[in-house]
Amino acid sequence: MAQQNSFDIVSEVDRAEMTNAINQTIKEVRQRFDFKGSAATVAMEAQELVLTAEDETKLRNMNDIFQQKLVRRGVPLKALSYGDVDPAGGGTVRQRVQIQQGIPQDKAKEVVKFIKDSKAKVQASIQGDVVRVSGKDRDTLQDIIAKLKAKDFGIHMQFSNYRTN
């Protein structure tokens, strides 16, 4: 029987690094002069973040600080999808940010279609929120990884579980 190689395409965010970036952001916001007396906060809920500030300018500045902290910690910004800025209680504004865990079904179908259109001798299948690519030749799998990295699907992708069966 021929040897079968495979890898998984996943999209995961390290929750510990996200928590560290939130804590650093809150610490910097408390120390900055332009945020003195401000009630600007970043809070993590189940699968989303809630950014709150007095006005949109402070919210945007706090978001810039937060994104800088995420980049320094290696958390991809593509894993975040920002909602609308909504008015909140007490004269503040709030913005919800969804954290992407797993590849959405429509994006997974797009990735599988891209792999099949490449005419490589590999099989791609969707398994929950993971796309598994398998084939006989390791070089072909590495070519597929290179092509996937070159194309922008609008989501953060990681390649894991590279193995030989």
Image (spheres, helix red, strand yellow):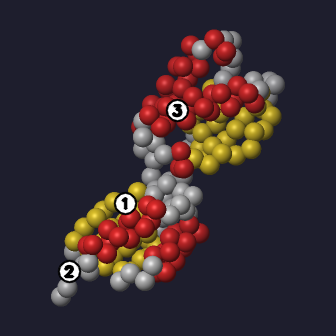
The residue to which callout 3 is attached is 68
Three-letter amino acid code of the residue under disc 2 = Gln
Question: Few, some or many C-alpha atoms within 10 Å of disc 2 (few <14, some 14-19, many ≥20)?
Answer: few
Label drawn at residue 20: none
The residue to which callout 2 is attached is 3
Three-letter amino acid code of the residue under disc 3 = Gln
Tell me the mark number nearer the camera, choosing from 2 and 3.
Answer: 3
Gap between marks 2 and 3, in whole Å? 44 Å
Question: Few, some or many C-alpha atoms within 10 Å of disc 3 (few <14, some 14-19, many ≥20)?
Answer: some
Picture coordinates of residue 49 (x, y %)?
60, 39
Answer with the quarter of the image where residue 30 lies.
top right
The residue to which callout 1 is attached is 159
Q: Residue at x 37, y 60 (%)?
A: 159
Q: Residue at x 68, y 20 (%)?
A: 39
Q: Earlier in the sequence, mark 1 or mark 3?
A: 3
Gap between marks 1 and 3, in whole Å? 24 Å
Q: Nearer the viewer, residue 117 or 3?
A: 117
